[in-house]
Image: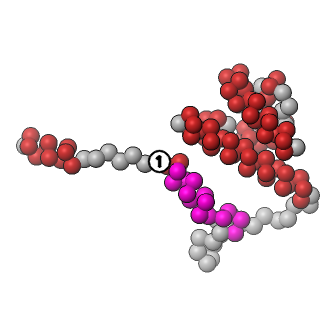
Amino acid sequence: MLELANFYLGMNKPERSDYASEYEKLLQSVNLDNAPISKKENILPKQPAPTDNNLETNKEDTVKKLKEYRLKQSRAERIKPYYIFNDAQMEDLLNKKPRTKEDLLKVSGFGKVKVEKYGEDIIKILSSSC
């Protein structure tokens, strides 16, 4: 019995999956604007055209930059991206547009630790795109 158990233990090889890189590959292979899964359905429905294209494009660029920063930081720290800030907190960032660390403390989910750790980078991203 011990011999059989050791045989099965010897055959076991732990599988280490890097889900972040798999997700990145998926994002690169899919164009979210109009990428069909099949001929009948799309990943996201098309949105109506905004009335002010410049503001909408600017917001989309800012969201993209914030998500790229969040992903880069999460990989560097080996944590989940939403630990840095989640989508609701990102929306609050976009609405309040903090210019200083003191302003950033007023954003939902940002305390002293997050502001010290990520504040300067986030403020640079927000100020460069506004």
Q: Amino acid at mark 1?
A: Asp
Residue 125 lies in the magenta stretch: no
**Residue corresponding to mark 1:** 18
Q: Is residue 40 visible?
A: yes
Q: Which quarter of the rendered picture does the C terminus lie within?
A: top right
Q: Which residues are magenta?
A: 21-34
Secondary structure beneath label 1 = loop
Image coords of residue 2 (percent x, y): 9, 40
Image coords of residue 31 (percent x, y): 66, 64
Q: Is residue 95 visible?
A: no
Furthest-bottom residue in view?
A: 39
25 w.r.t. 46: above or below: above
Q: Which quarter of the rendered picture does the N terminus lie within?
A: top left
Image coords of residue 14 (percent x, y): 32, 45
Image coords of residue 62 (percent x, y): 79, 47
Residue at position x 61%, y 78% from top? Answer: 39
Q: Is residue 7 left or right of residue 24?
A: left
Residue 117 image-quadrant placement: top right
Q: Count of labels shown?
A: 1
Query: Which secondary structure class fits the magenta region best?
Result: helix
Residue 89 image-quadrant placement: top right
